[in-house]
Amino acid sequence: MSFEGNNPMEIAFILVIVISAVVFAISFAFLARTQRTLTRYAQHPEQWDLEAARDPAVITAIAVGDYTRAALAYHDLTGVSLNEAKRVIEYLQMQPEVLNLVSKPKDGASPLDAGIRELVRAGDLEQAITAYQSFTGVDESDARTEIERILWEEDESQRRSMGSS
């Protein structure tokens, strides 16, 4: 096919069709890959030990982005293979709301709160804010307010325990 003598509009039209086809092919490949990834992680969470996933060590590691440490902690708690633990942690990273499928501990403390409190107690307030944001989806201002509230509760708890000693 020669473009000599062709109308510039025809050439532009052909280019638009070719570019559209390429964009469609790339988009389709990306969506197919995403679907395969989601299917891979769409194991049945109800078969996992989500109570272990709510352990403060696991929650804190996920919150700070240390997925290797989270997988190791989950592996240690459950005895599943490291590969399976990695899959569980990756799924929880993509779907943190799955942890809400499990009932809260009897004392009423949330596992998220337990991990956040560990960061607050360690004095790592910025990391606690980031972790709170990643798990709740709130903006930085709301996360900072909540971390300040937790810090205040921790201070009050220490004052009460010192006063009763």
Image: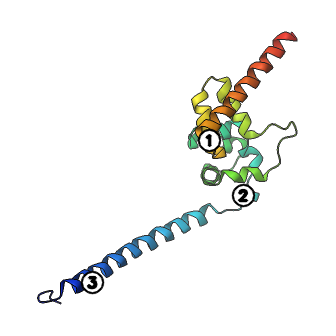
Residue at horizontal 72%, vertical 29%? Answer: 150
What is the distance, in whole Å, between disc 3 and disc 2 at their CAs? Answer: 49 Å
Q: Residue type at mark 1: give it.
A: Gln
Disc 1 target residue: 133
What is the distance, in whole Å, between disc 3 and disc 1 at their CAs? Answer: 48 Å
Q: Residue type at mark 2: give it.
A: Pro
* Residue 71 visible, this angle: no
Sequence-wise, which precedes: disc 3 or disc 1?
A: 3
Between tags 3 and 2, which lies in front?
Answer: 3
Q: Position of residue 56 (x, y in %)?
A: 71, 36
Q: Residue type at mark 3: give it.
A: Ile
| Mark 3–mark 1 CB contact (< 8 Å) | no
What is the distance, in whole Å, between disc 2 and disc 1 at their CAs? Answer: 23 Å
Label 2: element kind: helix
Q: Would residue 112 appear left or right of 6 to someone viewing this image?
A: right
Residue at horizontal 79%, vertical 50%? Answer: 102
Q: Position of residue 27 (x, y in %)?
A: 44, 71
Disc 3 target residue: 14
